[in-house]
Structures are given as C-alpha cells and as structure tokens.
Amino acid sequence: MGSKQRTYDVEFREGAVRIVIETGKPIPQVAEELGVHPGTLHSWVSGWRRNGSASSDRPAPAASGGRLSVRS
C-alpha cells in the first residue's frame, strides 16, 4: 500500500498560503477545503513566514503590512 506524492504548482501553494494568512482560518480547515494534507499546508505557511515565499527556501525581502508580495 504505497502513497502517491502529489505536486502542486507555485500559484496553488501561494494561493493556499494567502487564504490562511489573509483570512485567519486554521490550517486544518483550509487544508481540508483544498484537499491538501494539513502537514503540507503547514509547511508552506511556515516557509512563507520564514522566507516570504511558499515555494522557495530562499529568503525574500520583507513585505510591509504582513501581506504576500507579488513577484514576476
């Protein structure tokens, strides 16, 4: 009985983090709504809080006001 590892694109990860950060909904609730494992979403949110991005381990410039910054 193996588990299938899913991959999520950057836009999905950033959007999921944005929902948690901007709405204040609990990670388990958002994870259930999106069909993502809560531990995975927690990791994305932690990464954003640490680095400013849910998709990278590289530190990003701090965004003012605690909002996600948009990068092109």
Image (cartoon, rainbow, N blue to C red):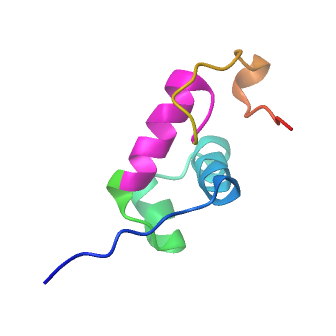
Residue at position x 51%, y 29% from top? 57
- Looking at the rendered structure, the number of numbered marks drawn on it comes to 0
> Relative to residue 41, is residue 4 drawn left or right?
left
Query: What stretch of residues is rendered in magenta?
Result: 40-54
Residue at position x 56%, y 33% from top? 48
Residue at position x 82%, y 35% from top? 71
Name the main secondary structure of what is drawn in magenta.
Answer: helix
Quarter of image, res 29: bottom left
Quarter of image, res 56: top right
Q: Position of residue 51 (x, y in %)?
A: 56, 24
Q: Position of residue 8 (x, y in %)?
A: 55, 62
**Quadrant of image for the N terminus:** bottom left
Quarter of image, res 32: bottom left
17 or 3: nearer the viewer: 3
Is 67 a magenta residue?
no
**Quadrant of image for the C terminus:** top right
The furthest residue to the left? 1
Residue at position x 61%, y 41% from top? 21
> Relative to residue 57, is residue 10 drawn left or right?
right
In this view, 22 is above or below 53: below
In this view, 60 is above or below 53: above
Q: Position of residue 45 (x, y in %)?
A: 50, 40
The furthest residue to the bottom? 1
The furthest residue to the right? 72
> Relative to residue 23, is residue 8 drawn left or right?
left
> Relative to residue 43, is residue 9 drawn left or right?
right
In this view, 2 is above or below 70: below
Q: Position of residue 49 (x, y in %)?
A: 53, 28
24 or 63: nearer the viewer: 63
